[in-house]
Image: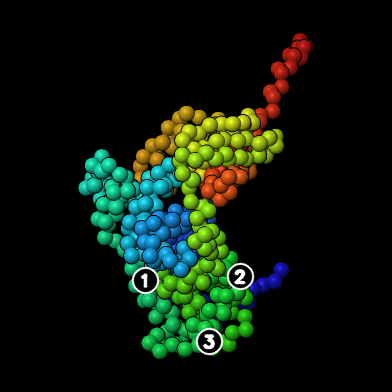
Amino acid sequence: MDVPQPIDNRLAQIQGILDTAFFAPLFKNDWLAYRFGQATFLRLEEPEVFDLFVRAALASEVIHPTEAEGRDPLAWLWDMADSAAVLAQLLASLRFDRPLLFHRTLMSLPAVTRGQVKPEEYELVEDFLAKALAQSDYDLAEAASGELETIYARALRAAGQDPDQPDPRLPELAGAVLAKPQAAELESDAELRLWMALGDGLDGMAPDLAPAVMVQAWYQWAGAVIGSAPNLELLGRMHPRLVLGAIDLAGYAPPLKEHLHTIKASCPFCGADSEVQVGPEIKPLQACPHLIYVGTCDEVHLMEAISNFEVGEDFRELLATYYQSPSDLDLFSTIVNDLFEMLVNQGRLAAVPVTSASAPQAFYNLLAFFQKPQAPSAPPSEPSPQTH
């Protein structure tokens, strides 16, 4: 077994400094949280990031059509004149598809929890949300940007650089590090720093510049996620699915309710196709007996799938109390996800993406959940004769 080389003392010192940032660890999926100033968008999973990106970009194109001309959707979201209006549309669209995320965000808005803005006073949920968002005065990105600059200056000093006049080669050298294929696969700034300190991230770098390049690469990576130094090329490498043109994005738009489409998924247990017609009404066309639910990966939908198993009524009621308590939503999410993963790993539950010939991309966020058929119970055996 190879023994890792000791970390350079300066790199170790820099690691300690960068670890003190209040936002550490910073995950690449956190960029939507900072773009919209919503802490409830932190720690999103990949399917959630893509789903929210699509919804936000579609809303932005409608609200700011002139700003969308000649540019790609990722650029639209970094240049929104009114991000609150886009966020209101985004949240409204989550009510049924991602209820936990909608509920969590709603419960985090001070104007809602204090009863200053009440939904019954508004005809449109978008107007209610826009009013509630307008009364939130905390800017997540602004606070993180200030912290980023402070930590960056401290780390540069530790790397032997003058924060006011650092080596002009640093941005280019850091850019070369971040352009390596391995960098795009890293999930957090902690992984990025570990890769540079213990891995091959800084291979070939002059020893006297390596610590400063590490600081600069962290600064550019974190700045792209937080948005203090937008870098759409870097962000696109982190999230290749988000590199879409306007025409590509249009394919993900939700179909009009009056239009009929058929979604289909093949059962992993029996191989039969299940089909559901969607439109003004939801109409099952054919389904194998193992299909139990169609929804997204939102924990509320996962709970619907899990409820087909013997989880117990008392357990469901306990989870319902967690769902009603803002402080217990993380616990609700953790339990549901753990139970879902357990059933999947046991081979008792499977989630399969749906397809649609008439709208190939419009149902990108839906999953069909299938339950493995139970083996027939063995008949009770005859009692063996007793010997006295």
Q: Quadrant of residue 140?
A: bottom left
> In the rendered structure, which amino acid carries the disc numbered 1?
Ser
Q: Earlier in the sequence, mark 1 or mark 2?
A: 1
> In the rendered structure, which amino acid carries the disc numbered 3?
Leu
* Residue reaching furthest to the left: 116
Q: Please tell me which residue lies in front, 198 or 57.
A: 57
Marks 1 and 2, Cα distance to the nearest angstrom?
A: 26 Å
Residue placed under numbered mark 1 in the picture = 145
Secondary structure, mark 3, is loop
Q: How is the image coloured?
A: rainbow
Residue placed under numbered mark 3 in the picture = 209
Give the residue drawn at x 53%, y 62%: 244
Give the residue drawn at x 66%, y 29%: 374
Residue placed under numbered mark 2 in the picture = 182
Q: Earlier in the sequence, mark 3 or mark 1?
A: 1
Side (left or right) of 250 relative to 3: left
> In the rendered structure, which amino acid carries the disc numbered 2?
Gln
* Foreground: disc 3 or disc 2: 2
Secondary structure, mark 1, is helix
Give the residue drawn at x 53%, y 79%: 175
Q: Is 214 situated above or below 378?
A: below
Numbered-mark total: 3
Marks 3 and 1, Cα distance to the nearest angstrom?
A: 25 Å
Q: Quadrant of residue 353?
A: top right
